[in-house]
Amino acid sequence: MLTIARLIGRRMAREDFEKAMRAANDNGAPSEEERT
């Protein structure tokens, strides 16, 4: 039971980390529309 809980916790943490990294990287190169 603890093993399953650990795996679920790790997966949730990984997903949260990925979301945070995506949000941090949102300021990429401006698109063609934003440049003009």
Image (cartoon, helix red, strand yellow):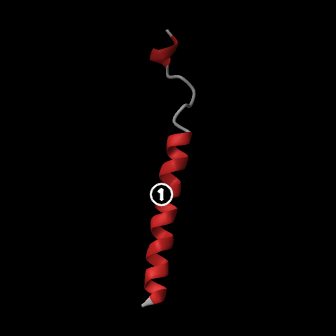
Q: Nearer the viewer, residue 16 or 29?
A: 16
SS state under label 1: helix
Q: Quadrant of the N terminus?
A: bottom left
Residue 13 in the image: above or below residue 7: above
Q: Residues within 10 Å of mark 1 (few under 14, many from 20)?
A: few
Report whether 17 appears left or right of 33. Answer: right
The residue lying toward the viewer, choosing from 34 and 19, is 19
Decide which of 13, 31 is in the foreground and name it. Answer: 13
Q: From the top left corner, tell me how far across and down residue 2 is, in percent.
A: 46, 88
Q: Is residue 33 above or below residue 6?
A: above
Residue linked to disc 1: 16
Residue in the picture at 55% in, 48% down: 21
Query: Could you tell me residue 29's position as x and y percent?
Result: 57, 27
**Outermost residue, top side:** 36
| Above/below status of 32 relative to 14 | above
* Residue at 48%, 16% in the rendered image: 34
At 51% from the left and 71% from the top, the residue drawn is 10
The residue lying at 53 percent from left, 23 percent from top is 30
